[in-house]
Amino acid sequence: MSSPDVVSLLESSKELDRVRKEQEEILSEINKLHKKLQTTPEVVEKPGDTSLARLKVLYTQAKDLSESEANISSLMLSQIDGILPTGPQGQTRRRIGKEGNEQKRKRVKTESDISRLNPTMRNHLEACASLKGEQLISCQVAARVTPRNADKDEWFVVKVIHFDKESKEFEVLDEEPGDDEESSGQRQYKLPMGNIIAFPKSNDPSSAQDFPPGKHVLAVYPGTTALYKATVVQGPRRRKTEDYVLEFDDDEEDGSLPQRTVPFHKVVLLPEGHRQ
């Protein structure tokens, strides 16, 4: 194990402690307001009373903190998984646009190109450990790279390379932008916690959430490093495999949606309010 990896894990644990402390403070305020409203419910009818408005703000903050706690916890699982000895990692996928199947076939990389551009997790960790002045997390996650007010959400598989404790933002690297990108080189983004979802551990199916048939999920489209909305047809437990059978939205071929196989560790819960 390398020192930067352990330091990054400790930094994440400190951030988790901070989030939980904030949760306790918010919960305390919520409980006080609950008690006030239960004791004197007529107060909300008085002109100028802001009890309900304040309660709404507190609930929103509590929801955001809860999501941050879940994301940090998932990220720490990935960090621990990167530190512990593991088997061979799954092959990273090439990102392409999903506007049509002709474009998919045109932009998918060959197997030789993928092997050449995608080192194993061990090589990722060694490369990150050699960088000076950075406390790099070095694990793959799903990231929404578009702003909240965008017409569509774009999610890609990226590598976390730094976490800014002051701004609470992740610096991530898109190692394989699509062929139609303005720049063919790697792209970096600085994203808030709410834009990051950690994948399940690839060597531990029990760490993944079990999505039932009919459930909407966010999954890596086969042959790419882009994630899209899909519907579960069959889960890995029912089929006794480590793959989901999915139908991706807007993936119509000959008037029907083809069923595609996706590894369990490339499938996550569809974010609330997802736009595609």
Image (tube, rainbow, N blue to C red):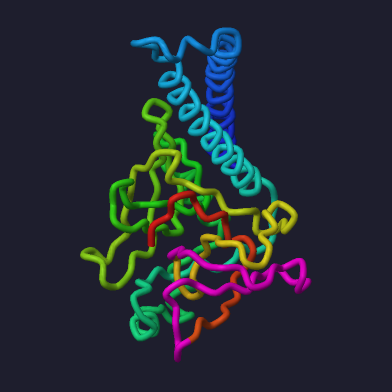
Could you say where residue 62 lies in the image, as x and y percent from the top left?
52, 27
Q: Where is residue 266, by image quadrant?
A: bottom right
Q: Is residue 167 visible?
A: yes
Q: Residue at x 43, y 68 (%)?
A: 117
Could you say where residue 36 lies in the image, as x and y percent from the top left?
55, 9
Q: Which image quarter is the C terminus in?
A: bottom left
Considering only vertical position in the picture, is 53 above or below 10? Answer: above
Q: Is residue 267 magenta?
A: no
Q: Residue at x 45, y 71 (%)?
A: 224
Count of marks overlaid on the render: 0
Residue 187 placement, left or right of 197: left
Residue 166 placement, left or right of 122: left
Could you say where residue 95 lies in the image, as x and y percent from the top left?
40, 68
Residue 60 placement, left or right of 182: right
Could you say where residue 235 lies in the image, as x and y percent from the top left?
69, 68
Q: Is residue 3 visible?
A: no
Considering only vertical position in the picture, is 275 above or below 40? Answer: below
Q: Where is residue 6, by image quadrant?
A: top right
The residue closer to the viewer here, 196 or 53, is 53
Q: Residue at x 37, y 42 (%)?
A: 191
The residue closer to the viewer here, 129 or 93, is 93
Q: Which image quarter is the N terminus in?
A: top right
Residue 138 placement, left or right of 191: right
Q: Tell me which segment is drawn in magenta.
A: 226-255
Q: Residue at x 37, y 29 (%)?
A: 167
User: Which residue is situated farthest in the left direction here?
Assistant: 182
